[in-house]
Structure formats: C-alpha cells, structure tokens
Amino acid sequence: MKQYSRHLVDLLALSVVLLWGFSFAAIKISLDWLHPFALTAVRFLPAALLLFALLGLGAWRRGRLVLPDRATCFRLFLLGLVGIPGYNLCLNSGQRLLPSSYAGLVIALNPAMIALFGSLWLKERLQGRTLAGLALSLAGLLVMVLGRDSNPALLRQHLLGTVIAMGAPLCWGIFSVGLRRYSAQHGSLTVLTIALGLGCLPLLLLWPPDLGLTLAQGGAPLWSSLAFLTIGCTVYGFSVWSSVLKSMPAARAGSFIYLVPLVAIFAGHSLLGEPLDASLALGGGIVLGGVWLATSGRRRVEVPVPEALA
C-alpha cells in the first residue's frame, strides 16, 4: 500500500471511530424523546434503505449483482434479528438507565465477545486468557458502577442498566461470528446489508405513528441526533469500516476500536456534562485491559463487520 493510501485509510478509520464514540451521546439525547424501541426503528429502517441504495449503485457500476440463495438469506435474516433489533434494543434500553460513558465502556466488550463466540462457534481453541479477560472486564464495570453511586436507588438503576446493556455485546458476538462464513463468498458489505435490511423488517411494527409531532417537539437536538446516528454512524460507519478492513490489517483496525469508549467518555463529558472521576478512570482502564487480554495472543480471523457498533 502506498504511504499516502495508508494515511488515508487511517484517517477513514479514525473518522468512523469518532462517529461511533459520539454516538452514545446522540443516543442519550434521542432517548429523551423516543422510546428505545422507537429509536431503533427510526434509526435503522432509513439506514437499511440507504445501504441497499449503496449496494445497488455498486452493482450498477460493476454491471452485476450476485445475491445469496434463499436459504442463506433466511439465515442472514435470523442473524440480522440478533445483530440489529436484538443488539440495539439492549443498548438503547440499558442506556436509558446509564450515563453514555458507561454504555460506551459496556460496548467496549464487543471484540472480547467476538473472540469468545469465535472460539465456541468456529471450533477454535478457547484460551484461558479469553475467559480471564472477560472476567476482568466485568470486574471493571462493577468498579465503575459501585465506585461512583452512593445513592442506593441510583446504584440499582445503574446496575440494572449495565445488565441490560450487556445483552448488546452478546448479540454482536453472535452476529459478527455468524456472518463470517458468508462474507468471503458474497462480500462483506453485501452480506451486512442483507442481514441488516432483513433483520430490520420487524422494526416496522415499532415505527412511532406520531414521529412528526415528536420531531417537532424535540427540535434540532433530536433530528440532528437521529441524522447523525442514521447517516453518519450507520450508513457511513458500516460502509467505510467494511472498506477499511479490506485495506488494513485486522490487528491495526482493532487498535482503533479501543479509542471508541475513550471518545464516548469525552463526548459524554463535553456534550452532556457527565462527570469524570476516579471510579470511571479506574473501571474504564480495567475494562479496556480485560478486552485487550481477551483479544490478544490468539489467531486473528478477519471480521467482516464493525467490531464496535454504536
């Protein structure tokens, strides 16, 4: 790769990381006006249409579009249910009870869950450091929550939110590892778009009938947050990260992922006034250390989808 090309790829990766890091603050703002279920629908149904448009444009430029067979599409539909509604309903519902910086650190477990499910599903040897890293990350989350919340009611709320949000990394581990077998044959963006599009179909039932009124009441903070999440974090983030993974070694791409929770903490503090304290720094450091332990020192399998989705 030419030097300037490498710099360009690095800049693209950094742009996606910044978007994903700020997405937690945008989700928090949107949840002031939308139920977690409605937010998932409003964000991902338009994003699915835009991704299908990009897929169609690419096929038109190449002069062909090869789609998976119906059996594969059905499996992608099932994976899409886990990876899109499942992941985001857990994240949005949990973040309703959590500061955005906490949610960013919970989602930092995504690569560790990919490592865990890769070992279980792809019959790779499950290393002790993977389990130790996950245990260390969970301990870091407890340090973060227990070290800050002296109010019993707030402590229970944050613990519940953390447990709910933990469903998101579990869903993403299943989704990411499940898509690997189809990516090589059909292309990562094609597989991801089909899984996302089909998985989003049940979200039609969650589309808020009074969305226009809600957007009017929420004003610029709401609709700008939704546009940021839909166009920036989802359409741009998914498509650009798929290209980044083709041009950058997976280990190097993984190093960018570690920046997402740090950006989330900065965004929560600067945009939402969330406090920075010793428990957040200590717990966050333990979480990231656990993720590093769980994902280092093992044979890396290329991941066709983002390792951290916000």
Image (cartoon, rainbow, N blue to C red):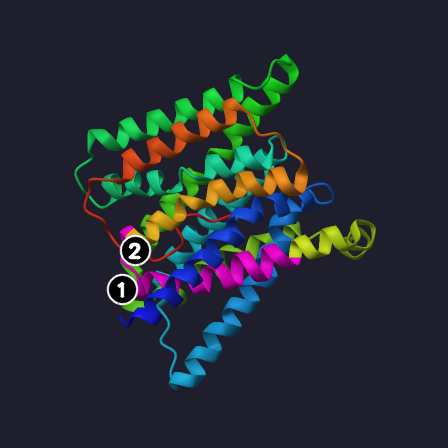
| Secondary element at image label 1 | helix
Q: Which of 1 and 118 is in front in this view?
A: 1
The magenta segment is 227-251
Residue 209 in view: no
Q: Nearer the viewer, residue 17 or 170?
A: 17
Q: Quadrant of the N terminus?
A: bottom left
When the figure is inspected, residue 55 is found, relative to residue 249, above or below; the finding is below
Kind of residue at disc 2: Arg
Across and down, in percent, residue 40 comes to: 60, 49
Residue 40 in view: yes
Q: Nearer the viewer, residue 134 or 172?
A: 134
Most extreme residue toward the front, as rendered?
Answer: 3
Say left or right for 212 vs 90: right
Q: Residue 180 carries which label?
A: 2
**Which residue is pictured at 74% across the width and 51% down the height?**
221
| CA gap, disc 1 and disc 2 | 7 Å
Kind of residue at disc 1: Ala
When the figure is inspected, residue 66 is found, relative to residue 126, above or below; the finding is below
Say left or right for 206 vs 67: right
Quickly name the residue at label 1. Answer: 184
Q: Residue 31 carries which label?
A: none
| Secondary element at image label 2 | helix
- Other-residue count near label 2 (Cα within 10 Å), few / some / many at <14 / 14–19 / ≥20: some
- Other-residue count near label 1 (Cα within 10 Å), few / some / many at <14 / 14–19 / ≥20: few
**Which residue is pictured at 66% across the width and 43% down the height?**
271
Q: Main secondary structure of the magenta part?
A: helix
Across and down, in percent, residue 252 comes to: 30, 53
> Pointer 1 and pointer 2: residues touching (CB < 8 Å)?
yes
